[in-house]
Image: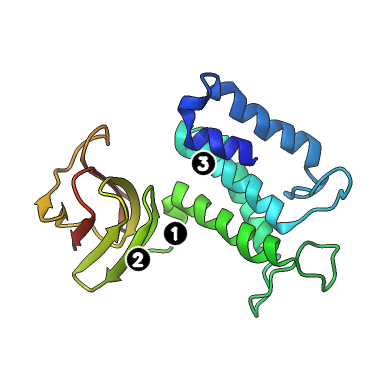
Amino acid sequence: MEMARYIIKEPQRDPNIATTVPGLIWWVKNTFSEPGMNAINEQTGCYLPMGSHTARYASICALWYERTGDVWFKEEAFRHFNHATYMCEPDGVVQTGHNWGTEIWFSDGYTDYIRHFMEGLAAIPEWVPVGNHLLKSSSTVQKIKYEATKISFTTYDNQSEVVLRLASKPKSVSVSGVQLKAVPQLHADGYVWKKLDKGGVLKVKYSSGQSVLINL
């Protein structure tokens, strides 16, 4: 699945991405899927369902849906993420899996597990609660400030693509003082707004600065 993630994020590396990634997803589903539940087992040597591996599989399905629009992968991501949530206890402790008792693996429960949910939500922003949230950025976000009428943040690089879930359509988007234009697709600098039932999704692409200001 990490190979699939790499190829999705670096599609120029594989001219056969359209068959490679679905092939990897189906191989994992056929080899490691737990019978009777939407869960993924760790390995053939430890053939037990685990929250982190289930969330990893779900995140790859979400990323592939984002790229292709194939709703089968969206549904697959939803069902496996839903199952993985049951590994998180009310006090925040993340269980390794159904059969592990009180044994907790920090890497699986608090690094892999959380990261996979974050990637999945960024890939399918309509799953994110209504509000103002920066979901992902191709450049490291150095700082961000949420205010009632604006969101401002700075990225490490002077070019980036970012995705935000917003409560309302922005009035303007600017980078280092230069206002960006609304565009139908992000082939060049600009922003795209996709309206949802409540609020919407803002995608921004820029290559001329580091400081972004979104007026709400």
Which picture quadrant has residue 140? bottom left
Give the image location of residue 4, x and y in percent. 60, 35
User: Upstream in the sequence, badge 1 or badge 3?
Assistant: 3
Which residue ends up furthest to the right in the rendered image? Answer: 45
Between 60 and 73, which is closer to the camera in this rendering? 60
Specify the amino acid type for callout 2: Gly
Give the answer, above or below, for where 153 lies relative to 92.
above
User: Does residue 158 appear to the left or right of 17 in the view shown?
Assistant: left
The earlier-in-sequence mark between 2 and 3 is: 3
Tag 1 residue: 128
Image point (68%, 74%), residue name: 93
- For marks 1 and 2, give the CA distance: 8 Å
User: How many numbered marks does the figure carry?
Assistant: 3
Check disc 2 and report its element: helix, strand or loop.
loop
Which residue in the structure is indicated by mark 2? Answer: 131
- The quarter of the picture where the N terminus appears is top right
Dot 1 and dot 2 residues touching (CB under 8 Å): yes
Around disc 1, counting alpha carbons within 10 Å, would you say few (fewer than 14), some (14 to 19), or many (20 or more)? some
Q: Which mark is residue 16?
A: none
State the SS at label 3.
helix
Say whether residue 62 is visible: yes
Return the residue at label 3: 63
The x and y percentages for residue 109 are: 68, 64
Horizontal side of 18 relative to 212 (left or right) equals right
CB atoms at circles 2 and 3 under 8 Å apart? Answer: no
